[in-house]
Amino acid sequence: DALEPSELCLMSRTDVQELLFTDPRIVLRIAEQLSTRLADLEQRLTDLTCRALGERLAATLCQLARQAPDEPIRLTHQQLAALVGATRERTTTALGELAKNDLIQLRRGKILVHDQARLAALAEGTNPRTPAP
């Protein structure tokens, strides 16, 4: 399911190959994108196996907040749980803890990041309880 309205274009294998052969910049751009995605997947695998849920959740919220700094995060608890590799129930509990510590605010269908610096500190495994000056 798409998170926002999207358009999908289909191309035949022959058309794609022809396009790639005519402009090597396209091949380079695709290779760069694949490399970035592979690095992201490796990081996610490391996170899933080595980091606590609170750290994974904080890191994911920081990443999403950086993508659209002035916008609330519009994900359900279930969608967020899938991103961090946890159940919806555990994710909801962890989100409640973040809200209780004033790192985020939960609204219906939205998450507002209040203190990205403290959230990033939690993502790195340091104690974010001290309010930012």
Image (cartoon, rainbow, N blue to C red):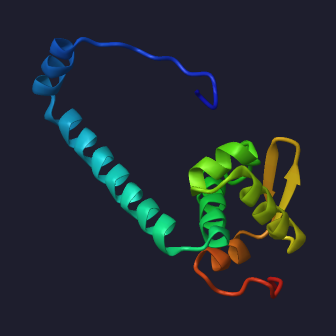
Q: Quadrant of the C terminus?
A: bottom right
Query: In which quadrant of the rendered view does residue 66 lie?
Result: bottom right
The residue drawn where x is 29% and y is 46% is: 34
Q: Is residue 17 above or below residue 26?
A: above
How many tags in the picture?
0
Q: Is residue 73 above or below residue 132?
A: above
The residue drawn where x is 80% and y is 85% is: 129
Query: In which quadrant of the rendered view does residue 1 lie?
Result: top right
The residue drawn where x is 89% and y is 70% is: 100
Residue 1 falls left or right of residue 36: right
Q: Is residue 22 above or below residue 114?
A: above
Residue 111 falls left or right of residue 40: right
Q: Position of residue 71 (x, y in %)?
A: 74, 47
Outermost residue toward the left in this view = 21
Q: Position of residue 46 (x, y in %)?
A: 43, 68
Query: In which quadrant of the rendered view does residue 130 lie?
Result: bottom right
The residue drawn where x is 50% and y is 64% is: 48
Pick the front one: 35 or 91: 91
Pick the front one: 24 or 131: 131
Pick the front one: 59 or 28: 59
Q: Position of residue 53 (x, y in %)?
A: 64, 68
Q: Is residue 118 above or below residue 69?
A: below
Q: Position of residue 121 (x, y in %)?
A: 65, 79
Residue 82 falls left or right of residue 34: right
